[in-house]
């Protein structure tokens, strides 16, 4: 039955792409230390400060188990805490925008039981590797499908009336890859344009310097010609003056 449900929801994924707030990989946190698994080249360490802020909020409330979410531009991070163990669930399966608290508790419970040995043996450098996390996906899909069909959740009921309803798996991962390539291409184009702009600016500076050199060269030639002309005129004036100076007669 579960396999049929998963097959059905996977079919719906292909029909109704929902590429909003996609989640990546699996991270386990303990003592505010973010351990990373890399999916599609995403650097999850960039979310460290936001995650630590969430954990701080959880600890201040002093409750044994609670759920908080952090929504970023491209991912949603679900933080679940049970005693000293804090687990961050970040999947390359997109969770629905809003899950019922009971559903999240079920997901956490299964997550914890699946990775109990790993979680209990955590140190500051531990993380759930992606091979382990892959085995967790089918159960997650089942929970998510149940959440999507939860008629007691008003948000989900309203959401089901729109086409932006189903979660995605392979389709969204492929979309992420395509979008990542587009971003990389755009960044490359931006770098090329920056370099071209820099080269153009350098060329403009060279042209201005060349124009200045030509200007001062022309100006210096004009100044030299003027100096020669002035000296020539002064020479002529002196010559003319000498013509009018009376010469003394030394003969007896």
Image: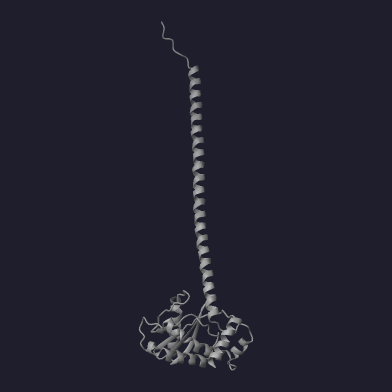
Position of residue 115 measured from the top left corner of the image (x, y, whole percent):
41, 88
Q: On screen, 90 above or below 180?
A: below
Residue extending furthest toward the top? 252
The one of 178 and 87 positioned closer to us in this rendering: 178
Q: Measured along the vertical axis of the image, is residue 104 above or below residue 232? A: below
Q: Quadrant of residue 86?
A: bottom left
Q: Which residue is drawn at 46% across and 81% down?
A: 25
Q: In this view, does 82 lie above or below 184?
A: below
- Which of the pair 252/225 is nearer the observer? 225
By what rule are the colours in the image chosen? one colour
Q: Position of residue 200 (x, y in %)?
A: 52, 54
Between 4 and 207, the one lying in front of the other is 4
Q: Identify the residue at horizontal 45%, vertical 84% (top origin).
A: 133
Of 202 and 144, the residue lying toward us: 144
Instruction: State which quarter of the image contains the C terminus.
Output: top left
Instruction: Determine the residue positioned at 54% across, 93% down.
Output: 1
Q: Is residue 221 left or right of residue 12?
A: left
Inspect this view and state whether residue 79 appears: yes
> Does the rendering let one see residue 73?
no
Residue 8, horizontal then vertical, whole percent: 58, 88
Q: State how many labels appear.
A: 0
């Amino acid at each position: 039955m579960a396999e049929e449900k998963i097959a059905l929801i996977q079919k719906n994924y292909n029909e109704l792409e929902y590429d909003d707030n996609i989640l990546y990989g699996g991270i386990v946190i303990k003592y505010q230390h973010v351990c990373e698994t890399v999916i599609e080249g995403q650097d999850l360490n960039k979310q460290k400060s936001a995650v630590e802020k969430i954990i701080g909020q959880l600890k201040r409330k002093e409750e044994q188990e609670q759920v908080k979410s952090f929504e970023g531009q491209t991912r949603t991070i679900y933080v679940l805490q049970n005693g000293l163990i804090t687990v961050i669930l970040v999947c390359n399966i997109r969770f629905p925008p809003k899950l019922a608290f009971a559903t999240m508790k079920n997901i956490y419970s299964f997550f914890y039981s699946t990775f109990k040995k790993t979680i209990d043996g955590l140190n500051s450098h531990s993380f759930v590797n992606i091979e382990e996390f892959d085995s967790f996906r089918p159960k997650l899909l089942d929970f998510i499908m149940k959440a999507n069909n939860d008629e007691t959740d008003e948000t989900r009921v309203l959401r089901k009336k729109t086409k932006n309803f189903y979660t995605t798996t392979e389709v969204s991962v492929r979309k992420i890859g395509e979008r990542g390539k587009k971003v990389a291409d755009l960044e490359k184009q931006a770098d090329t344009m920056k370099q071209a702009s820099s080269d153009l600016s350098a060329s403009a500076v060279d042209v201005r310097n060349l124009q200045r050199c030509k200007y001062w060269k022309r100006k210096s030639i004009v100044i030299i010609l003027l100096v020669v002309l002035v000296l020539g005129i002064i020479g002529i004036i002196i010559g003319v003056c000498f013509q009018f100076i009376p010469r003394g007669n030394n003969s007896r």
